[in-house]
Image: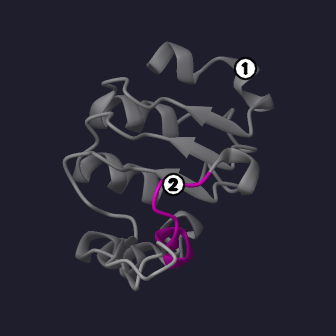
Amino acid sequence: MPDVAQAACLDRLVALDLRGNPIGDDGLAALVDSPHLGRLRWLGLARCGIGAAGVEALAATDNLPALRYVDLRRNPVEVTARGHGQDIDGKPISVELPPLGQELIARYGPLPWLDVQWGWHWLGVGWEEV
């Protein structure tokens, strides 16, 4: 991942879907260290083996100023807002941000990808929506 993260062609990306690739915390840390992802708005990391160290690196980076949404479903830690319950229309009844997400916001300030608005979407958010 470190070699890929340094590729200058990444500067054109607005969305990057790595779902199902076992990049883990080290791979995510290498990715967020890239100086070429300043336009990235949507990042798919579901089922990538991301733990607390990986989301900490994501929260701490200044290299992703345009990032608005990160799909972190089905990873070892829960960090993004999730809906609970279901109303008659199939929408969540309530949305909560897990403790780790709250800790990251307390430490690093508001992070658009941790906004509770994303928790109202059961199946995630498509890149064209951000």
Q: In the picture provided, is 10 more to the left or to the right than 5?
A: right
Is 119 part of what is drawn in magenta? yes
Image position of 23 with respect to 66: above or below: above
Segment colored magenta: 116-125
Q: Tell me what residue is drawn at x 37 percent, y 28 percent.
A: 27
Q: Tell me what residue is drawn at x 76 percent, y 44 percent.
A: 39
Q: Residues within 10 Å of mark 1 (few under 14, many from 20)?
A: few
> Which residue was labeled with disc 2?
124
Q: Tell me what residue is drawn at x 70 percent, y 25 percent.
A: 10
Q: Which percent across, then down, holds residue 111?
A: 53, 70
Question: Which comes sooner in the sequence, label 1 or label 2?
Answer: 1
Q: In the picture provided, is 125 more to the left or to the right than 108?
A: right
Specify the quadrant that holds the C terminus. bottom right
Specify the quadrant that holds the N terminus. top left
Q: Which percent across, then down, holds residue 80?
A: 39, 65
Q: Tell me what residue is drawn at x 37 percent, y 27 percent.
A: 20
Q: CA distance from mark 1 to mark 2?
A: 28 Å
- Work out whether residue 90 or residue 1 is closer to the camera in this orientation and state it: 90
Q: Give the image quarter of residue 84.
A: bottom left
Q: In the picture provided, is 123 more to the left or to the right than 53?
A: right
Is 53 part of what is drawn in magenta? no
Q: Residues within 10 Å of mark 2 (few under 14, many from 20)?
A: some
Residue sitting farthest toward the bottom? 94
> Which residue was labeled with disc 1?
8
